Structures are given as structure tokens and as C-alpha cells.
Image (cartoon, grey):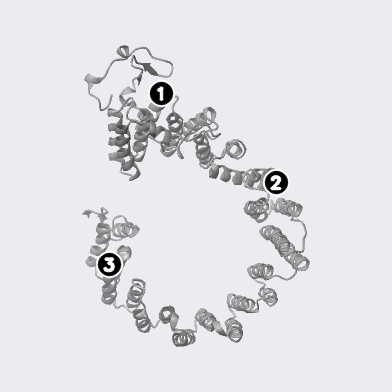
């Protein structure tokens, strides 16, 4: 047995007869595993302190890779001490050290009630070290062989399937997952196995098996805190399939397992929109899509809240009407969408939210004039006027947009800065940079509380206008280092003043640790622009050496390989 001197190992005959569970009965009532895998049995480690049967029986951990508190209490103090050391390194993802510490636990306390858990965690360390065959054959399988009645045995069965899946052994993974589903159908491991099995059905497009698994998770699997999300996701996937393939009632039934009656209409619409969109986009299935839209709308009407005259009752009715409009929108039924909104307004009276939704749909269909007619009906005239201005800007009618925002200057005197900002933004959209700058300079005088905001807007407008020196002057007044320095550097590069740009990037490297890797990468690109090949290479190599874990190091590494045919080890040496 690994880790134990041969003089301490006792033969099977000496230990006594073997019972059916695979444990030998000891005269002192201690039990030892039997089998040729005994050499490895104590090393298995694992994954979990098994949660609770999903039907609620038994004390369990929250996840498959945790030991329940009641099991911890059964450990002796010295056992807890050693196991905690292993767990610490496991949590820190120091897999090699954790592996050694779990093995040490198993060597020292081979008869501990925590041995199955230790072997499971040992196995999981092997998985993390990408030794998947070792994890399966010498780890998880040994847990099942030596402790078949332990919670860890169920977890090990699941992890065998997961390991095969990670190895790309689809057939073996399916077999392992099916065994978990057959033998432990109410366990969390079964829920996890079903989720992974669904992924495998995508490979060979086994829709029959996928539906079987979705139904299992939706209708049969007990829902606990740990399995809840998997079951909810399955119910939505099953419903989407049912909606798309002419089984509307079945889809609603699937969602009803997850959502309460008040929640159901919103969730039905949420799920039905995607399949509905696919159906109506396909000329061969458009009629099926229209039928689904009619079914959904009719079902929603049947679920409509009782009529009432209170504000709360009217708002509930509006919200329900919006769901019908959403369905008609997904089905691309423009006439029915407009009709639905008009019915809401007619029955329940003008409401800014309804008018805004209606107008937003009209804008999405380029019906700008009609959208503005709805905005003009707003009770909140200032907000309606703002949206009118936005619609003109979306339509690229910039003069009309500016006029709309200017109208709000007279209506909303206390918030003049807000409307001047919109006017300046419109000038920028129209590429009338001088006019925009004039407005920002006015704001710098009239709204000193937001000086930083207006300095940045002025600088950015000068930059967009190609006036880089002026932009640099305003960026220099900003206090949002390192963003202002990065913008100044970009302006210097645009003016081909590469040395100044490099100096600014260097200041970012020295003063902003979170941006240092990016800035060093920019130094490399700037040196390239300046024609300094050797200095550029050194800068890219420095990124790889100093910031090996940053994404910019990967970019520098790829650039060195692709452009200069230089291979750099992240954090280390160079080969040419």
C-alpha cells in the first residue's frame, strides 16, 4: 500500500474473512479494504462529501466535493488537523501539494471514517493535474470498490463520467452517466450526470435522449438548493423545444414546474420568443410560427387579470398587455403589435410607459414620425421632448434634434446643463466639432461642479476633430490617471511624436500597476511605428517576462512569433 512500510502491511489471510461489502472483518472491529487495488485505495481523494439525497434524506454537504459537518465531527482531532492541511492547499489550487497531503492523511489514518473522502479528493487532484486515467482507474474506481456504501462512492461514479467526458471518450462517459442515473436517480450526482449527458447528446444530435434527460430533470428530479438551477434550465430548454415543435401545452406544463402561477405568463413569453423568431424567419415554417403566436396570445388572454378600476389593477392589465405585444413583435406581426398597443391605450388610458413602449417599437421599425406623435402625448412633457430629440438624432436629422433639446432649455431651466450636453453630443454626431466645443466651453463656465466631465468631453471632441495638440492640453487638465495619459499618448502617436508617447506609456507602467502590462505592450507597438525594431522586440519580450499572467502577455507572445519568428516563454527565456 502506497506510503506504508511493508512491515506494517498484513495479508488478507491474517486480517480475517471478507464480507460482501469488500471490507475484511477485524478482530478489533476495524475494517480494511481488500483487492489488488489496495495499493492505491488509500490515495483516492475527492470530490465530495456527498450531499444529500435529493429527496432530503440524510445529512449531506452542500456540494459533491465537500465533507458534511456531521462527518467532520466523527474525525479525531489529529485526523481533522491533517485533513484541514490538505483542504487548505486544495482550496488554494496547489494541486501537487494537496495531493501529497491527502496521501499523507491516508497513510497515517487509513482506518479513519474520512478515508473515502480523502481518496476522492486525491482523485480530484489527479484530475486537476490532467492525469485523468490515473484518477479513474486508481482513484474513483477504488472508492467504489472499497467503500461501495459510502456517499463518496456515488460521487466517484459521477466523476468517472465527467473524466471520460473531459477526455473525449463519449461512449464511456455516456455509460458512466447512465449508471449513475439508473442506480441513484434521486441523488444530486444524477442531476449533474443528466446535465453533462445533455452536452454529449449535442455531439451526435441524439434528440431523443436529450428530451428524456430534460424531462427527467424537469418532472422527476427532486429540487434542492444544489439541483435547482439544473432543473430550472432543463424546464426552459424542454419548453422551448415543445413550443417550436407544436406542443404548446406541454411547454407551459414544463415551465409550471419552475414558476408560480403569477410568474408563468412572463416566463412563457420569455421562452417562446426565440423559437417563435426562428419559425417566422423560415418561409417553410412561417405558418407554424403564426399559429404559435396565436396560441400564445390566446393563452395570455385567458390568464389576464380581472378587470379593475384601481391604479394597481390597471397597471397589472397593462403589464399583461405588454406580454401580448411582445409575442406579436417576436412574430413580426406589425399590424397586431400596433393594434395591441392601441387597445391598451383605449381601454386603460394614456400612460407614459405604454406610449414609450409603443414609440420604441415604432422607432425600431423606422416609423419615426409616428413614434414622435406618441412621445408628444406624454404626461411628462420634458421627457417626451427629450425622446423626440433622440428620435431625430437616430434619424440623423441633427438640426431638428437640436431644436427639440433647445425647447427643453426653456421648460427645464434648473437642468440646463443636461440639455446643453445633449446639444453638444448632437453636434458631435453631426461632426460639427467647433460648435460642440463651444457648448462644452460654455458648460465649463456655467457648471463648475462637473468641470472634470466637461474637460474630458472637450478633449475628446478636439481629438475626434483631429486637433491633437488642443486635445492634449485638455487631457492634461484631467485628473483621471492613467486614462488621460493613455489618450495623450494616442494623440502623440497620431502626430507621429513617438518619443513623447513612449514617455507617457512609461509613466503608466511606473504609476498604474493594473494598466502596466497594457502600457508596455503599447510601447512595443509605438517603437514599431517609429521604426525601432530591436526596441520594439525588447518591449514585447518585457511584457512576456514581467506580466506572464496578463492577457497582454499572450498578445505580445503571439506578435513576436507571427511578426518576428521569436518564441518567448511567458515569464522566461527566448528562442530564435
Task: Give me the C-alpha separation between circle 1 and circle 2.
Answer: 47 Å
Q: Is residue 527 visible?
A: no
Q: Earlier in the sequence, mark 1 or mark 3?
A: 1
Q: Quadrant of residue 372?
A: bottom right
Q: Residue 13, position in %: x, y? A: 31, 11
Q: Which mark is residue 324?
A: none
Q: Which residue is nearer to you in this view: 157 or 503?
A: 157
Q: Residue 32, position in %: x, y? A: 34, 20
Q: Is residue 273 left or right of residue 176?
A: right
* Residue 159 to residue 415: above or below: above
Q: Which residue is nearer to you in this view: 82 or 558?
A: 82
Task: Give me the C-alpha separation between circle 3 and circle 2.
Answer: 59 Å
Q: Quadrant of residue 207?
A: top right
Asked whether disc 1 touches disc 3, contact meaning CB atoms under 8 Å apart, the reply is no
Q: Earlier in the sequence, mark 3 or mark 2?
A: 2
Q: Residue 158, position in %: x, y? A: 46, 33
Q: Which residue is disc 1 drawn over?
A: 145
* Residue 426 to residue 176: above or below: below
Task: Give me the C-alpha separation between circle 1 and circle 3.
Answer: 57 Å
Q: Which residue is disc 3 drawn over?
A: 509
Q: Is residue 178 visible?
A: yes
Q: Which residue is disc 2 drawn over?
A: 248
Amino acid at each position: 500500500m502506497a506510503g506504508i512500510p511493508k512491515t506494517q502491511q498484513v495479508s488478507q489471510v491474517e486480517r480475517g474473512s471478507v464480507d460482501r461489502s469488500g471490507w475484511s472483518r477485524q478482530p478489533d472491529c476495524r475494517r480494511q479494504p481488500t483487492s489488488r487495488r489496495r495499493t492505491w485505495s488509500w490515495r483516492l481523494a475527492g470530490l465530495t462529501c456527498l450531499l444529500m439525497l435529493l429527496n432530503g434524506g440524510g445529512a449531506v454537504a452542500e456540494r459533491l466535493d465537500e465533507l458534511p459537518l456531521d462527518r467532520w465531527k466523527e474525525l479525531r482531532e489529529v485526523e481533522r488537523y491533517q485533513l484541514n492541511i490538505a483542504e487548505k492547499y486544495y482550496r488554494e489550487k496547489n494541486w501537487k501539494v494537496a495531493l501529497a497531503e491527502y496521501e499523507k492523511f491516508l497513510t497515517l489514518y487509513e482506518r479513519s471514517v474520512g478515508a473515502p473522502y480523502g481518496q476522492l479528493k486525491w482523485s480530484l487532484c489527479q484530475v486537476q493535474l490532467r492525469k485523468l486515467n490515473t484518477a479513474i482507474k486508481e482513484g474513483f474506481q477504488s472508492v467504489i470498490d472499497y467503500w461501495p456504501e459510502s456517499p463518496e462512492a456515488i460521487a466517484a461514479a459521477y466523476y468517472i463520467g465527467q473524466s471520460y467526458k473531459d477526455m473525449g471518450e463519449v461512449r464511456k462517459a455516456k455509460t458512466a452517466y447512465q449508471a449513475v442515473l439508473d442506480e441513484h436517480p434521486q441523488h444530486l450526482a444524477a442531476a449533474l450526470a443528466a446535465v453533462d449527458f445533455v452536452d454529449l447528446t449535442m455531439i451526435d444530435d441524439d434528440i431523443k435522449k436529450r428530451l428524456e434527460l430534460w424531462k427527467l430533470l424537469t418532472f422527476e428530479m427532486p429540487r434542492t438548493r444544489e439541483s435547482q438551477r439544473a432543473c430550472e434550465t432543463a424546464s426552459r430548454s424542454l419548453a422551448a423545444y415543445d413550443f417550436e415543435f407544436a406542443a404548446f401545452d406541454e411547454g407551459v406544463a414544463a415551465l409550471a414546474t419552475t414558476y408560480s402561477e403569477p410568474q408563468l405568463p412572463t416566463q412563457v413569453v420569455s421562452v417562446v420568443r426565440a423559437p417563435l423568431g426562428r419559425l417566422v424567419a423560415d418561409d417553410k415554417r412561417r405558418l407554424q410560427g403564426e399559429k404559435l403566436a396565436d396560441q400564445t396570445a390566446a393563452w395570455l388572454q385567458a390568464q389576464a387579470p380581472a378587470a379593475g378600476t384601481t391604479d394597481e389593477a390597471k397597471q397589472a392589465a397593462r403589464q399583461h398587455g405588454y406580454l401580448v405585444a411582445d409575442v406579436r413583435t417576436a412574430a413580426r406581426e406589425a399590424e397586431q403589435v400596433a393594434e395591441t398597443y392601441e387597445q391598451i391605450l383605449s381601454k386603460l388610458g394614456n400612460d407614459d410607459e405604454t406610449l414609450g413602449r409603443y414609440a420604441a417599437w415604432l422607432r425600431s421599425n423606422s416609423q419615426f414620425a409616428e413614434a414622435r406623435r406618441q412621445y408628444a402625448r406624454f404626461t411628462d412633457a420634458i421627457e417626451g421632448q427629450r425622446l423626440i430629440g433622440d428620435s431625430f438624432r437616430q434619424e440623423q436629422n441633427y438640426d431638428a434634434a437640436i431644436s427639440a433639446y433647445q425647447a427643453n432649455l426653456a421648460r427645464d431651466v434648473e437642468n440646463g446643463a443636461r440639455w446643453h450636453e445633449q446639444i453638444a453630443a448632437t453636434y458631435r454626431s453631426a461632426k460639427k466639432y467647433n460648435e460642440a466645443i463651444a457648448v462644452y466651453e460654455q458648460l465649463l463656465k456655467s457648471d463648475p461642479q462637473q468641470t472634470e466631465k466637461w474637460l474630458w468631453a472637450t478633449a475628446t471632441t478636439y481629438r475626434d476633430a483631429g486637433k491633437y495638440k488642443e486635445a492634449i492640453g485638455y487631457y492634461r487638465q484631467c485628473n483621471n490617471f492613467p486614462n488621460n495619459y493613455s489618450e495623450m499618448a494616442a494623440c502623440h502617436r497620431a502626430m507621429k511624436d513617438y518619443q513623447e508617447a513612449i514617455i507617457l506609456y512609461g509613466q503608466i507602467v511606473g504609476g498604474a500597476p493594473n494598466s502596466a502590462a497594457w502600457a508596455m505592450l503599447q510601447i512595443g507597438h509605438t517603437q514599431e511605428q517609429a521604426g525601432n525594431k530591436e526596441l520594439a522586440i525588447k518591449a514585447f519580450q518585457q511584457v512576456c517576462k514581467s506580466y506572464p499572467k496578463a492577457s497582454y502577455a499572450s498578445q505580445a507572445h503571439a506578435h513576436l512569433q507571427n511578426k518576428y519568428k521569436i518564441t518567448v516563454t511567458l515569464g522566461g527565456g527566448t528562442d530564435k
